[in-house]
Each structure stands twice: as C-alpha cells, then as structure tokens.
Image (spheres, coloured by chain):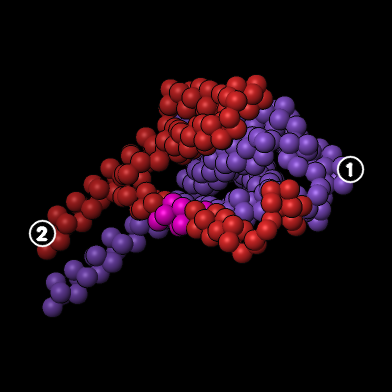
Amino acid sequence: MSDATLNPSSRYFVREHHPENGTLLGFWIYLMSDCLIFAVLFATYAVLGRNYAGGPTGAELFDLKLVALNTSMLLLSSITYGFAMLEAGRKRLGATMGWLIVTGLFGAAFISLELYEFVHLLHENAGPQRSAFLTSFWSLVATHGLHVSFGIVWLVTLLFQLKKHGLTHENMRRLTCLSMFWHFLDVVWIGVFTFVYLMGVLP
Amino acid sequence: MSDHNHDHHGHDDHGHGHHGHDDHNHGSLKSYTIGFILSVILTAVPFWLVMGNVFANPATTAFTILGFAAVQIVVHMVYFLHMNAKVEGGWSMLAMMFTLILVVIVLSGSIWVMYHMNANMMPGMDAHQMRNMP
C-alpha cells in the first residue's frame, strides 16, 4: 500500500525538478511567438513594399551607409553580450557588468541612429501615412526598434539587480534570457537590413 | 524500496548531467569569435554587392543577398544562440521547427496569393500604373 502511494509521488517530485530549466524553454517559446509577429510584418512588407502611391521610393529614401553603421552597432552589441555571458560563467561580476554596459551603449547607439533616420524621413514627408510602402516599412522597423528599446530597459534593470544581488542563480537565469532576446533581435535585424534596406534600393 | 531509491538516484544524476551541459552551453571565446568574424563577412559582402553595383542584374543581387542572410541567420543561431538538437531535450529545436514551418507558410502564402491577386484581378494595369497604386 505504502509502496503504491510512494511511487507516483516520487515521480511527481521528479517532475518538480523541471521548472528550473522550464524558464529558458518558456522564454524560447515566447521568442518563437515574437518571431511570428515579425513574420507577419515581413509578409506585409513583402506584399506592400513596392506600392509607393506616387511617393518616395526606398531607393530615394534609404541611406545605406547609415544602415551599415547601424548594423555594425547591433553586431558589436551581440558579441559584447557574448563576452558578458563568458565573464558571468567565470563568476566575475565587475567584468560582466562592464560588458553589459558596453552592450547597452551599442544598443543605445543603434536606437539613436534609427531615431535620427526616422526624424529625417519625417522631414522628407515620408511618415507612415504617406504610402502603403511606408506604412509597412514603419511598422516593421519601428517594431524592431521598440524591441531593442525594451531590451535596453531590461538590461539596465538587470544591471541594478546584479549590483544588488551579484551573480546568483536567479540572475544567471535572467542574464541567459536577455541574452537569447538580444541575439534574437540581431537575427531579426539580418532580415530587416537584407529584405527592407538592401533589396529596397534595388531597381 | 531499494528500487525506488535507485530510481531517484538515477534521476538526480541526470539532473546534474543536464546542469553541466547547460553551463557548457554558454559558449566559449572561440565560438563567439568565430561567429562574430563569420557574421561580419556575411554582412559586409551583401552591402558591398548592393552599394558597389557588382551584378548587372538586380535579381541576381537579390537572390545572392537573400542567400547570405539565410546563412548568417544559421550562423547566429549556432554561435550566438547556441542552438542544437540537444537544448532542453530537443524541445527548443522542435518549437523552432514548428515556428519555421509557420513562417514559411505565412511568407510564401502571402506573397504568392497577393502576387496572383495583382496579376489576375486588375486587367489593363501596366507597370507604371501599378507603381502609383496605394
């Protein structure tokens, strides 16, 4: 009798081990759902991206040198986040926070350049209401930019948590989640600079 | 009872093994460096192809840079996101495959359907008029 009740409960306890790693899988599934949001925005851009309504075209609006600079900022922030994770693995708090700050600065540079581009577009009378092309462009690029902005907010929050609690188990989990989020946004940006900017200026 | 103990111990061992694997999964300086150098190359070449007008035919350029983007996405997945079939016992890979199938359906389906809508539903529209469509 006691054996019969013991066995299922022991299995139950074994299952309780899982939520420890469950966060990372759950966060990965959130990223996949985010990926679907971007897929829909990419599909919208693919359908509407050449409907200029007599307005400016991508070839007239996009400054590829600025986009190249922007891309390098995001790429550099990816590798510096990697360095932060490596230092965190070695349990070196100061170096981890240092690389995180560098990552945040690269992210902020990316957002600043993007905002500069957006202001420039608005001055050219190329706001989101100008044409179907510009609506889909602004939806896609600004959604990505918003994600990066929230990533920076998360990063600053994490810096305070690290300063207060150090490299605890919980903070390592948070660091890993933000790492996935940050690298995922870089992956989305590959799609944006290829599909929107580079292909947008092709005749 | 002894059987139960053995069972529990086995699971514990598995748990520790998994933990060790997770730590290993944060990558190494070497893997991050390889990933970074590869992505710099895979980013620079498409920009050079477009800004330098290397190919005369725009369609060739378009397909080439799409190919570079696909390779770069895989590079980022492997070297930065440390994606492989073993993460979370394969569930991460499964979720990604499912998402990729949905993404392919959404993208190819939208482009295909809307292209044919444009081609079939609006007779008498030439390229110049299409340019001025909202």
Q: Nearer the viewer, mark 2 or mark 1?
A: 1
Instruction: From the image, tell me which residue sits under label 2.
Output: B2
| Palette colour of chain A | purple
Residue A202 can be seen in this image: yes
Magenta span has A104?
Answer: no
Residue range (magenta) = B98-107
Query: Residue visible at 54% across and 43% down?
Result: A184
Q: Quarter of the image holding residue A41? A: bottom right
Residue A189 visible to the viewer: no
Q: Position of residue A80 (x, y in %)?
A: 58, 29
Say what amino acid the circle numbered 2 marks: Ser
Q: Position of residue A73 (x, y in %)?
A: 66, 30
Q: Position of residue A161 (x, y in %)?
A: 62, 45
Q: Position of residue A172 (x, y in %)?
A: 50, 43
Q: Is residue A29 above or below residue B72?
A: below
* Residue at far front of view: B124
Q: Which chain is red?
A: B
Foreground of the two, B17 or A25: A25
Q: Quadrant of the C terminus of chain A?
A: top right
Residue A179 got which mark? none
Q: Residue at x 28, y 60 (%)?
A: A14
| Label 1 neighbour load within 10 Å: few <14, some 14-19, many 20+ | few
The residue carrying mark 1 is: A123
Q: Quadrant of the N terminus of chain A?
A: bottom left
In the image, are marks 2 and 1 on the same chain?
A: no
Which amino acid type is marked by label 1? His
Q: Nearer the viewer, residue B20 or B126?
A: B126
Chain designation of label 1: A
Residue at image x 58%, y 30%?
Answer: B57
Q: Is residue A149 above or below residue A67?
A: below
Residue at the (18%, 68%) spot, across then down: A7
Element assignment for label 2 = helix
